[in-house]
Image (spheres, grey):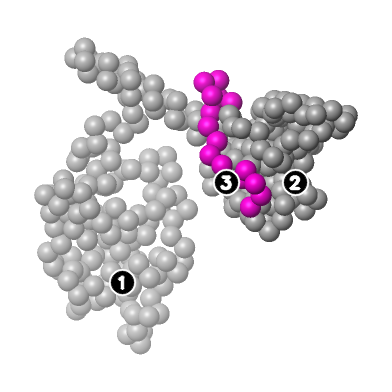
Amino acid sequence: MADGDDRQATFGSDGSLETDTTPDATGENDFGEPKEPNETDGGYNRYAVSSLLQKAVRRSDEEVAAWAAWELARSGYAWNLWDRLTLYVVEDLRAGSDVALTIQRYEELATERWEPAEWKGRLCAIHAALAAARARSTREGPNADEYFRAVAEVRAEARERGEEPAHDFPVGDLEPGGRFDAIFDAHTGEGSRLGRGTRFFKTRGARVGPEGEGEHSARWQRLAMLLDDEREYSAAELDRAVEPVDPDDPWHEPETIGGGDEKGGDAKADDGRRDGRDTDGEGRDADDADGSLSDFST
């Protein structure tokens, strides 16, 4: 790692990055003049170039982003460049973007394998900036953080006045029996006190969202439930366990599933099983003609 890359950076009251000028950032600019503190080789202020890089990424301006990254890298401010690019991943790019790993790899190459201000290091800087600029830009993270923080203040002020808040968190009070009842399984104190064990978890808490389980995953889930030595599941429960949640109401759960009392504990019950076998929800035996559970399909 080049000199200065491992140094702690701090932010000033205006949000700008503050640090001493590193040896890599000294020398002359493009005009043969001694560089001033925080000056780039092109004669720009590095804070301005750093801000330009972030705004270019946010606005998906590839050429400007590539230049700003190149300018910082060649001017001895690679530490500033990589610090900011890493911040952009969480501040300005859509959650789940795999560009985070791409930028991390380019940084490793530029700072650990090569010198960041040299040709290969500059190429890594350009590639990383282009990757960030080409990714889906969004301010969803900072916007959510700011909104939730504001709501927290509104809730606290309303409680102090003994009033209902004008704005509340999207989860309300989080109580059993409410919209998010499915979360209160044996993994929570409330769920344990209600006797909600594996049955409740399998048929409610473990369900996944609108795309549903893949073919293999759904098959494995059904078979694992059928082979459970401690509890017997009805056909309706087997179906419910792998049924996708409703995209328009992902938290809705019926009071009962197939008429059973599955919201309670895990006591072993008949639940409609015939001779120790279950059905697939369409009246067919869960095991096939030769009695093999391994061929049971969804």
- Nearer the observer, disc 2 or disc 1? 2
Which structural element holds mark 3?
loop
**Pointer 3 residue:** 6
Answer left or right for 129 relative to 93: right
| Cα gap from disc 2 to disc 1, whole angstroms | 56 Å
> What stretch of residues is rendered in magenta?
1-16
Amino acid at pointer 2: Ala
On screen, residue 116 versus residue 187, left or right, reads right
Furthest residue toward bottom: 290
Question: Dot 2: what SS?
Answer: loop
Which residue is painted at 41% across and 72% down in the image?
A: 297
Image mark for residue 117: 2
Of labels 3 and 1, earlier in sequence is 3
Was residue 168 drawn as part of the magenta stretch in this picture?
Answer: no
Q: Residues within 10 Å of mark 2 (few under 14, many from 20)?
A: many
Sort mark 1 into few (<14), some (14-19) or many (20+) by Cα contacts within 10 Å: few
Frontmost residue, 187 versus 70: 70
Mark 2 and mark 3: Cα distance apart in space: 15 Å
In this view of the protein, can residue 153 be seen by the observer?
A: yes
Circle 1 SS class: helix
